[in-house]
Image (cartoon, rainbow, N blue to C red):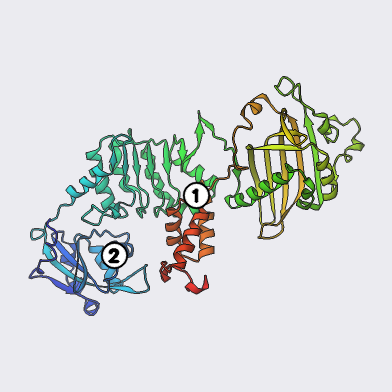
Amino acid sequence: MKIGKAANMMPNSGAVYVTASNLPTGIIYKNKALLSSQNYWHKFIVCNAASTSRNDILDAIMEQVYPMDLIPVSFWRDNHGANFLARNCEHAIEKLCKDNLVVANPKTNKKFQLNLVLKFATTKEFTIDIKKNILVVLTKRFNTLTKVLNLVKFHEEQDLLEYCPLSQPKIMFFVLHLAKSLFPHPEVYLLQNNGIKILNPLESLLTQVPYIKSIDLRYNNISNIDNLHYLNIFKLTELYLDGNPFCEKLSVDEYVKLITNTVKGLRKLDGQLLKLDNLPVAKRNYFCNFQVAPLVNQFLEHFYHVYDSNNREGLKELYHKDAMLSLNSTYYPNQVTSISARIHTYSQISRNLQKLANFSMMHNNLYLGNQQIANILLNLPATQHDPYSFTVDVMSYTNSSIILSISGVFKECIDGISTDERIYGFFRTFVIEIINRDGLCYIVNDQIHVYNALSWQVRDSFKYKQPLIETPSVPQNPEERKHVLKAIKLITNMNTQWCIKYLEECDYDLKNTLIRFVELFNQEKIPDHVFEQPKNGV
């Protein structure tokens, strides 16, 4: 097709003009034969759309007629507005007419007003072949070395002459079918950010099932869980689905169970290992709720900074006035630390119930109150902890409390200098009371277990300088992303679509997203319509 051909055409002599004013006359039903015929092109005229991009106009119309089929071609502008042609779209036209040819514009408060020209041209008078153009784009987006076909935001591809949204099942099926003929053995399909709602077009890849190892469907609009059964046809080892609406309906455990029961043999889901040698994969750090990670990191960093300092007096302020502390110790033989270990320092205040000969003394080594606890900790040897060795599990988190366990390695210091002769392992459980939203909290229970470090711990410790714990800077699963999205919406007051936009630009890093938002807000580069309340209310 030559660019501008449709724009230069005159309407067919039998063309029928449809406007909001003549809809009440029954003009659509009188010309139903024109709508049902596959031999006619119909012209769509979108008024008051001068300042709106092609994709935004067509996205709005497609959203309004969904799930009816409508494939726009040959978009152009003239003095009457934005124009495009479509055929074989009877039900979509009927839906638009029921809405009085008015289409909501999600970008502004204004609405698009449509006019139609039925039978604008016949399929003989106007021909179009977008296959060649799509094949060129697909070739550009295929990596022959990695066998990855990148269809991310396919409709925004600059080299596409026509609007090809994969959110339209027919278009998605057509594009995947062309890709299949072009690349017989691709291993990875990237389908992120395409507004995909249903997955039945994936059936076009049936002949490629033995070769496809990974499909990425992140940040689409899949809301119906029943759609997932289309993934049954594949033998995938890796799958990405986070960022879809259905994810918000499920807890993390429910989500993982649903997907693994639907798609057998998965090793990775949303980038996280599910199994290793057919055994569940353990995570080094576990957070029952991603929102608590910054608070936990801040608490541990401050606690061990004070604990390893020359003055532990500040620890008193970290414990509740009615807090409890208990300690026990174990000596392990046949370790590289066994000869130099000095467990006696810890065992003399240990509350190991298994070693108590007289249970009437079980309360003697249970230390109560922040002053008594501070005195005990002050009398323990000076230490230097290895933050890289830390493993943290947050087992419980509510608005008022945190229960977390931390294990790792520390050295004792002699005259202020750490020594490799005395290296210990530890396991510690804190119960923390949260006082307010500003992060004020107190330790109400502290249980410590100390032992001479195991040989492998000595081998692997004190090699790197790292943050205290490896809290993920970005969310690791759909549940965590949901919390980050909720936080951004609460702070910025932007709608969901724009919150996701900025989060994606910053790889879901909460801090960088907020910095980006503040910069653009101060420059007044964020449109008013993206705020769910007036801008001055932010």
> Which mark is drawn over residue 349?
none
Please tell me in which quadrant of the rendered image residue 423 appears.
Answer: top right
In front of the other: 418 or 36:
418
> Which mark is drawn over residue 478?
1
Q: Quadrant of the N terminus?
A: bottom left
Q: Which residue is mark 2?
A: 53
Query: What is the x, y in percent for residue 305?
Result: 70, 45
**Amino acid at circle 2:** Ser
Sooner in the amino-acid sequence: mark 2 or mark 1? 2
146 over 48 or under it: above or below: above
Query: What is the x, y in percent for residue 414?
Result: 77, 33
Q: Residue at x 69, y 37 (%)?
A: 385
Find the distance from the CA under tag 2 to the CA under tag 1.
Answer: 31 Å
**Amino acid at circle 1:** Pro
Left-right relation of 324 to 407: right
Please tell me in which quadrant of the rendered image residue 40 appears.
Answer: bottom left
